[in-house]
């Protein structure tokens, strides 16, 4: 059993985020010219800066920590805690790392005390929904229903599209299953099974009236769309893993990662191509033509959950930005 998996996942997502930040808006030719064939391979700066991906993952994690300290864990308890953390992020002077428009707009609505179902951006399924959800996967002792509802709620507070909800739940469960010792090779099939099992499940206790959007006749129709879109990209993931091509831009197989289901699949692809080499997994995510910081961030979360903290280079832990927050969350759940 590999130790300190929660720490491994929290630090891993930050390492991937930091390595992928300088390549986020570059194509493969530009990355090759600027960084060489492996892309960025070393943390840059002291501290090595991260983006809004890590900042918001910490916000989700700290809100979750507050809620779990005051049981029972319910939507009514955690929602105002997440609202406060998201608004704190919105107003932070460090929120200058090219944050997503959806998160900015929705968090401004949260700051104005609008109900979150009105503040959220209903049509958005950007990767901001699931780049930050790893803490919900790492928190121990949650039932499957609670973990599913909470992972969807944290997404729904900013991204109201059903695919953002489904992709966030799948990301959280992938992190949980890896931390529990699942063989990475089993992950694509397990996630596809969950897509089929959950296709008609709407977590009303967590999501309220979110489903009441134009063209939606009932909650099941709303949520099924998200699971179907995730299933399609996970089928492409399974094919790409079977192909085993470590040299080609991973976005060529599972998409650029700007939307939630592609961020999940391409982050997983980078991890599954290098399941026992976490550094190469995040290198591959950073050297990609799409949303490279989010792809590498997710790959790092998966790799760290699988291999634990000791799999990362020792010297990185003292150099990454927000190391204290990452260590606090990891220690709480290891």
Image (cartoon, rainbow, N blue to C red):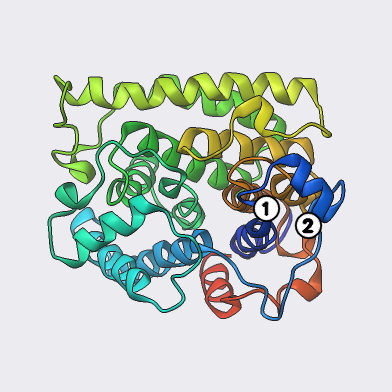
Q: Which picture quadrant has residue 5?
A: bottom right
Neighbourhood count class around disc 2 (C-alpha, 10 Å): few under 14, some 14–19, many 20 upward: many
Q: CA distance from mark 2 to mark 1?
A: 8 Å
Marking on residue 289: none
Q: Nearer the viewer, residue 35 or 103?
A: 35
Q: Nearer the viewer, residue 104 or 191?
A: 104
Marking on residue 40: 2
- Residues at badges 2 and 1 in contact (C-beta under 8 Å)? yes
Element at badge 1? helix
Up-down: is 269 above or below 69? above
**Residue at position x 71%, y 40% from top?**
270
Q: Nearer the viewer, residue 23 or 84?
A: 23
**Residue at position x 78%, y 20% from top?**
243
Identify residue for label 1.
23
Q: Is residue 288 left or right of residue 94?
A: right
Up-down: is 328 above or below 27? below
Residue 332: % across, % down: 51, 71
**Residue at position x 73%, y 53% from top?**
307
Residue 41: % across, % down: 81, 59
Query: Is any atom of residue 180 visible in this view?
Result: no
């Amino acid at each position: 059993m590999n130790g300190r998996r929660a720490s491994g996942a929290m630090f891993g997502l930050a390492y991937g985020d930091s390595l992928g930040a300088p390549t986020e808006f570059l194509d493969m030719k530009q990355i090759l010219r600027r960084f060489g064939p492996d892309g960025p391979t070393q943390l840059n700066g002291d501290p090595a800066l991260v983006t809004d991906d890590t900042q918001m993952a910490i916000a989700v994690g700290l809100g979750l920590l507050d809620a779990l300290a005051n049981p029972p864990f319910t939507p009514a308890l955690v929602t105002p805690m997440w609202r406060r953390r998201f608004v704190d992020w919105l107003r932070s002077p460090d929120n200058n790392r090219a944050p997503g428009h959806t998160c900015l707009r929705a968090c401004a609505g949260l700051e104005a005390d609008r109900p979150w179902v009105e503040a959220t951006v209903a049509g958005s399924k950007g990767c901001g929904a699931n780049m930050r959800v790893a803490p919900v996967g790492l928190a121990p002792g949650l039932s499957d229903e609670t973990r599913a509802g909470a992972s969807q709620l944290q997404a729904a507070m900013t991204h109201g599209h059903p695919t953002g909800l489904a992709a966030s739940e799948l990301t959280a469960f992938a992190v949980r299953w890896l931390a529990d010792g699942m063989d990475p090779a089993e992950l694509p099939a397990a996630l596809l099974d969950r897509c089929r099992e959950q296709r008609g499940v709407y977590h009303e206790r967590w999501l309220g009236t979110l489903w009441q959007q134009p063209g939606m006749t009932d909650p099941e129709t709303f949520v099924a769309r998200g699971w179907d879109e995730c299933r399609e990209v996970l089928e492409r993931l399974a094919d790409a893993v079977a192909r085993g091509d470590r040299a080609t831009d991973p976005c060529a197989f599972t998409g650029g990662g700007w939307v939630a289901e592609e961020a999940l699949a391409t982050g997983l692809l980078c991890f599954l191509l290098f399941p026992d080499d976490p550094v190469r997994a995040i290198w591959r995510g950073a050297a990609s033509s799409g949303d490279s910081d989010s792809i590498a961030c997710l790959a790092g979360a998966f790799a760290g959950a699988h291999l634990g903290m000791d799999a990362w280079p020792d010297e990185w832990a003292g150099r990454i930005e927000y190391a204290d927050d990452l260590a606090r969350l990891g220690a709480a759940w290891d």
